[in-house]
Each structure stands twice: as C-alpha cells, then as structure tokens.
Amino acid sequence: MMSKVKNAMSTLVGGMLPHGHHHHHNHHPGGGHGCDGDSLPPRFPYGRPDFLDLTPELLQYSTEHAARPVITLKRGSRLSWRTGYAEVINAGKSMLNEDQASCEKLFVKKPNGKHRNSTVLEDNGDGTGIPLHFWGIFDGHAGSGAAIMASKLLHRLIADRLGEICHLLENPTSAPPICLAKNGSPFQAEAKKGAAQEPDDPEAISDSTVRFHMEKVVSLESLVMGVLETAFKQMDDLIEKEKASYAISGGCCALAAIHLMGKLYVANAGDSRAIIVRNNEVIPMTNEFTPESERQRLQYLGFLRPELLGNEFTHIEFPRRIQHSELGKKMLYRDHTMTGWAYKTIVEDDLKFPLIYGEGKKARVMATIGVTRGLGDHDLKVYNSNIYIKPFLSCVPEVKVYNMDENKHGPDDVLVMGTDGLWDVTTDREVADAVSAYLSCCDPSDPMRYTLAAQDLLMRSRGVPKERGWRLPNDRLGSGDDITVFVIPLAGHESET
Amino acid sequence: MMSKVKNAMSTLVGGMLPHGHHHHHNHHPGGGHGCDGDSLPPRFPYGRPDFLDLTPELLQYSTEHAARPVITLKRGSRLSWRTGYAEVINAGKSMLNEDQASCEKLFVKKPNGKHRNSTVLEDNGDGTGIPLHFWGIFDGHAGSGAAIMASKLLHRLIADRLGEICHLLENPTSAPPICLAKNGSPFQAEAKKGAAQEPDDPEAISDSTVRFHMEKVVSLESLVMGVLETAFKQMDDLIEKEKASYAISGGCCALAAIHLMGKLYVANAGDSRAIIVRNNEVIPMTNEFTPESERQRLQYLGFLRPELLGNEFTHIEFPRRIQHSELGKKMLYRDHTMTGWAYKTIVEDDLKFPLIYGEGKKARVMATIGVTRGLGDHDLKVYNSNIYIKPFLSCVPEVKVYNMDENKHGPDDVLVMGTDGLWDVTTDREVADAVSAYLSCCDPSDPMRYTLAAQDLLMRSRGVPKERGWRLPNDRLGSGDDITVFVIPLAGHESET
C-alpha cells in the first residue's frame, strides 16, 4: 500500500533488516504506531510467501528498489488449480515489501478428532473432510507484521470455523437449524414453554405463540458468509491479543477468496480488488473501502461519539480547510446524512480539521490513513496526539458469492486478485483485455500460463525505470507501490485430482 | 401505508370526521403517538389534493371503503406536463386516505425582492425566475397530519432553498464557490492568512500552504441534491416545531421529484417508489428504506447508543424469538457488522426483543414501524413504553439524478411515482409493460391519456371486490392499502408553453 499511513513511525521487526527503515518521510502530519513492541520478538519473521521458496539471496534480491525484480512462482512449483502468481516491491517507500500472500488447500473437518490442515501445495491431511481452497492477499502499511501474521493464520481460522459447522455443510439440502445444543445437534424448545402465559390475557398467549413460530430461513451460503466475517474479526482480535507478547507492526488490507462446495466466496476488507474475467466480460467481486466510500459511516460514528475525535477533528466535511478569517462566512459542507453539498455559516468548531479530508488516493481519515477496513492498526494514533484511529476502522469484510457450478468456464476464464498497486494504474477493463489476450496466445497445457499472465499484468502497472521514475509504454507514471497478483483459472478445480 | 404502525393510537384531526377512527386494531403490540395534540387545532384540515378540486360530496364519497372509488384528475383540469394522477382509499385500515400528493409549478427567485410561488396549475408569479416543477407523494401512517402538511409545504421549502443559490444556478457553467460572503458573493480569503506560521518550523508553513490550496470541486448538481436533502430535514423540523401549536398526527413517507434546468431529481425517504419507463425499459429511480434494507444502520445506532433501546430491545438480530429454555444453547445471529449469519451462545441479554424483527412487509423496528425514513413521527413510542422510535428514523432522502437533456423521449416515456400500495402487488416490469401497452393504444393528443394510464395501473393493484376481499384477475389478493399514482410524461416539458 502506497503511503497509506503518513510518515509512519513503525518499526520493521523480525526481518533481516534493522529497525525503522522507511526510505523517506513526507511532510504531512501523519500517524504513528506506538513503539511498545520494539523490545518484543516478532510473531513471524519477515519473508516472502512460502510457496515462492526463495533462497536468502533471492529474498535479498527481491528488495532491490532500483531494479524492482518481478518475483513469480518457479517453473516446477505448483499451486492448486494451477494458480498464477507474481509480485514486485515498491519503488522505495518502505525497505521491505509490505504485501503478503497465501494459497492453501485445506480440509474442513469436525473439531473433535485430530485434524491437521495441510500447508502449501501438498495435502498433508488424511484426505478426508470437505476440500477448501484459499487464496489471500494482504497489503500492509506502517510495517509488515500484521500482513505476515494474517497470511500465516487467516486460512486456519476460517477452516476451524467451518469445521464447527461441518455437520451442517455435510447436509447441504436442509437449511441450518436456528438453534443448536452444545453437542451441535438441532435444539427444539418445547412449544410455548417459557412464553408469557397470563390466563387473564388471551392476547399475550396468541401473540407469543405467533411470535415464537415466526422463523427466518437462513441459507447455508449465508452461514459460510458469516464464517468469513467472524473469522476476520477473530484474526483482528488475535493480532491485538498477541501484541502483548510479540512485536506485530502496522496493519493490512485483507482480500480472501475461498472455494467451498461449488461456490467461490470473495471477502474484502480494504482497497485490494478482485474481478472475475469470463469470456472477456468483467464481473466485479469486491468494493473498495476507503475514506471516500465509507465517509458516511465514519462521520456517523464521529457524530455519535464525538469524544473519539479528541477535540481536534470535526465530523463535518468541507471541500477544503477553513481559515480563521472565514468565520461567519458561508461554506459548503456535508454531514453524515448527506450526499449532496449545502452552505453553512462557519462557526469556531468548523475550524477543526475534518475527519475525512482529501480526494481520491489522497483521502485520509484524521489526516492519517487512506483505507478504512483491514486487520491490525490497534495502536495507530494521529501524529503527535493521543487520538486512536482504530475505532473508525472496520475489520469486517464484504463477502460476495459466485456460483461456480452454475457457469461453464473455459481455460481463459479467471479470477484476478490484486493489491491496489495493480489497479491504481490499470482499469478492470484493461486488466480483462490484457489477461484474455495473453492467455489466448498461450499454450493451454503450459502449467506456467497463469503465472506468466500474472507477470504480464504486473508489468503493465509497474512499467519500466526511466529518467523520471517508473513509466508505462504511454509514458504515464507506473505504480511505485508494492504489487501482488493472483490469476486463478476458474476451470482449475475441474482439472484438480 | 398499510398497517405500517401497529395499532396506532393517533387521532384523526382536522377532518370532517371525529377523532380516533381506525377501523380495526390488530393484536400485535404496537406503537402509539402521544395524545398531547388532541386539544390543538389542526395545522391543515383533512382533504384531498387541491388539484382534484373535489366537492364535499365527492370528498365524502372518496372515503367509501366498500366501493373504493378511483379518484382521478377531472377531464378539463390540467397539471403541468399533462401529468396523470389517480388515487384510491384503503380497504378499511383507516377511516381516511392517509396518502397525499402535490404537483406544482414554481419559479426560483432570489430571496430578497417579493417572490410569490405559484399554486396549482396556474403560474401566479410574474413569470420571471428559473422554472421549477415539483411532484410529491406522501404516504401517511398513524394519522394524516404529517402527510397533509408536507404536501402543502415541502415544495415551498425546496423553492426557497433553491432561491438562496439562485445566483449560482444562473451561472451553470462555473462551479459553485466554496465560500460565500454574507451577501452571497464568492469570498476569497487572503492566501496563507490565518495559517500557522512559525518561522522556526518551515514544514508547518509549506504544509499549511499546500493544505489551504487543496479544494474539492463541487458540482451545481450536488448543490441541488443538497437542497433536497436539507429541505426534507427542514420540513421535518418544522413539523416538530409546529406540533407545539397544532395537532399534526402521525408521520409519512415522502417521495419528491423536481425538474430543474434540464435535470430530473428524485428524492425518496420511505418505501414509495419511482421508476422511469423509457422505450419499455425500466430505470429505477429510488431504493426503499425499510427495517430490512436499513438493518445495519439501525443496529449500529442501537449498538453505539444502547440507552435508546430502553433495556427492552437488543440490537442483535435473531431469526426468531428466543425462549428462556434456550439459554446456554447456540443460536444464529447477526450484528451490525454482518451480512451472513453465525452461531452465538445465548445469554440473558439475548432474551430481549430484537430491534429489527420480522421479514418482508412484516419487518418492524422495535415491533412498531415498518419504514425507516420519512417525516414526522416525533412522538411515536413503542407501545406501552417510553421508548421513542424517532432516533432510529431518518428524514433524509436518497437523491438520484436523471439528465433529461441527454435523452430523447417519446410520448410513451414516463416517470411513474407510486406509494407502496401500488408496488406491493405489481412489479416494476409489470408496471412498465402495463403503462407502455396502455399508452400505445391511446390517442397521443388525448390530454387525459396519462391520467387514464395512472387509473389503469391503480386498478391492477387494487383489483375488484370479491367474496374474500379485493382480488386481481388472477385471483391473487389485491392491495388493501391506500394507493396513489403519478404518471408523468418525460416529453411533457417540451410541449410546455
């Protein structure tokens, strides 16, 4: 993520590099993470995704900001579904690549009984259980600790939570029971027991009878969505908890896709993006969560809980900062209820800094952070203040579902997942055209075709080094951010053994 | 609105009928409005829209619940753009028709200088100013007071607020200034004046310079959207204020469309609906605001301000009521962050009644109200309690814009606005097909064609009286609710003199 947290004071922990190496600090006031973690060990050492299997030399080489080498899956390595992968480090905004990624095949099993989830590429389990495929990309900011931890653990939390409803997943034809006993079997309370029954009030009886018999039918699909939502929350809580014992720096956007029982679930918290490209048609699978897209939610919180603004910020948005000489004049504004703009007379309180300020990629929450969902960031504060950002951030993803079984997929139909570095300079349409064109020229039996397509996409956003920065063929500026791309063939699960 | 407020205790005020006539009370616990207003005079007497010009006999006839006569615009009357109109009373849930409507042509003028907004059909002004067309439908509940008041005043508030930015509307090519002096002219603060300038801190200077020069460009269109949003708020505040002196019963959903300078703005607060039918294609112009569609907003408020739930309700949603015997078991739930469902262990607090409960048309906020946006309802409380509903309701509309000038319209292209009675039994597609079919068989020069089309739509939702209620031709149940329909020809403004 490119300068998402301004002038971050976080430390690089657990890496091969010493603490606190951010290449440049910009001049804006910015957020900082507390430094309590400096003396603690890292939760996981810095590295690149296990499936890349980098040697120490290659790991070092991957951090060359001048060359920005594109790192891809090795020929001979294989991810599930022949998934393609490519990544590149930023142009210098942080010493290390703050993006992380994971790709796992697991099996969903009942929690009692030993279950060993498999790790990369291999199925280490006994092959029983419901197959679960997982892809995740984690775009860190202000340090790589949270992104690394999430890339190591999020899929396990998801598999565990799915394990708890395993017996329901095994009966996909019947709707999940509303209530479960402790052993997980459906619990049926005796009819009317516990309902108010005053003999002198016949209405109360008929009312409660009706009420107890009204039940919403909940689908298995929305149960899996609930698993993803609560697993992200659990991951975020775990980061907070383990910060007591480990140094876990920064925060991260998290984008996860799982394939379970014929459906693809895409869960997004942050500004990464996933699209399905089918027959060269784009199907968006995510919305981005930014200060602009979540403005009203954040303003509403600031309005209801003004103490979170620490007397420094106003929840009202203005098109620019107000000067003292403008007191009593009228200025355009909008509050948490508005989409349009209106004029208001400027009062003393309006001179405070706006909670949401700036436009597009420069929009910030409390002048500090440019994304509004993700994991970590528990000790992120407004620069030089005691105002915490975390209450304004959400760790809960938006989940979209794509029914694989309802669609036929050719070898060129793919799910593309990328961090914002990819999408900042290349549109959905351009990505779809590029990946379709690339794959159509590529031998369908080449096991590297999706990795080569991922590399091609990445190059289109990174560009090549010229005198004035990284440039695209049309001489526009390329992305100087970390970039991570998965290209996942949707026909891949059919070819899976 | 059909039983949107359960068992409402409100009084019918200012009508030709005595107080408190609701035909039946159902057995669910429900909300009631305070009765403080009983001794106060009505703000406006009960009646039907002025443009119908009903005689006292016809007004009485319009309330016949057994016949449910369809009331339309008279032949010879004319609304702007040849707008068609039809209405019918409910099947007996309230003595009077709680829907109201208005259709006005006004002129936007500067506030200083005498401005007289025109009333129905005629342009009483001097013909100067920017022409403004207004259509509004107001679906009342628990009394007709708020709906009547809004139908009389909302368009005037909108015209007045537009008047305040009249000089900006007259210069549509330049973006509105961020800041205005008291006289309304753009105010330009001196550069850097008022910015922090500590000579020993060069960063502070460059920072504040940059910051003050960053300005969002706000469009004239979003200024008009802001006018609609703030005018609804002002209308709601006015109802609250005038309740001190007048009896203004109940609340209402409000759907307003305005045409200004080549654009159609549709503002919706509630569960009425507007669609454009163009070339028999449907373009939705509204979203409905109901306990289901606004669940997360309401739960978030209940979560942040639990005192608003009065220790009687829980912000967590369950698929049904929980019985006491289910304590300690696991039940499906979702909170304000979730779209999917998950299991939680039931604790004592979960036995409270859910803030949002029921499905579809039966969904309610605190067992009381079935819509979540609108005007009025300031003293609506949960039945038999001191818990106010109003904090959970929003009076701010969602505004959508349709650029009339960018599209060519034939005589059969229309905007259809209807209260929920219309849409409960007839889908968007069916409405579009019916109106297209009807108009294509109708003499394009007949001034009554849009009113006849509105009447045709209304009949399709009302049906005809049979042994077991009002029935549609396919024998499905018709709507027993009040129904109000505008059919507005989009080519109408071209034919306007």
Image (tube, coloured by chain):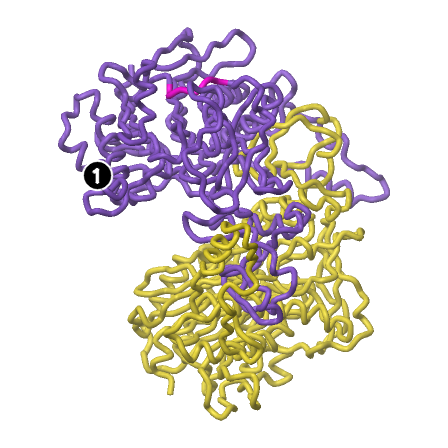
Chain colours: A yellow, B purple
Inspect this view and state whether residue B119 appears.
Answer: yes
Check disc 1 and report its element: helix, strand or loop. Answer: helix
Q: Is residue A431 rendered to the left or right of residue B183?
A: left
Seen at 27% across and 27% down, the residue is B69
Q: Quadrant of residue A248?
A: bottom right
The extreme front residue here reads A200
Residue A204 in picture, x, y percent from top left: 52, 52
Q: Is residue B255 above or below residue B299?
A: above
Specify whether residue A169 is painted magenta: no
Magenta stretch, main secondary structure class: loop
Identified by mark 1, the residue type is Ala
For label 1, the crowd category at 10 Å Cα-Cα, with few meaning under 14, some 14 to 19 and many 20 or more, is: some
Q: Is residue A263 rendered to the left or right of residue A52?
A: left
Seen at 64% across and 40% down, the residue is B386
Residue A307 in picture, x, y percent from top left: 75, 46
Residue under label 1, please give it. Answer: B434
Q: Is residue A55 above or below residue B18?
A: below
Q: Is residue B361 above or below residue B97?
A: below
* Between A6 and A334, the one nearer to me in the picture: A334
Count of picture labels: 1
Magenta extent: B44-49
Residue A300 in picture, x, y percent from top left: 62, 45
* Chain on which label 1 sits: B
Seen at 42% across and 63% down, the residue is A217
Image quadrant where one finds the C terminus of chain A: bottom left
* Between B277 and A293, the one nearer to me in the picture: B277
Seen at 30% across and 44% down, the residue is B425
Residue A465 in picture, x, y percent from top left: 55, 63
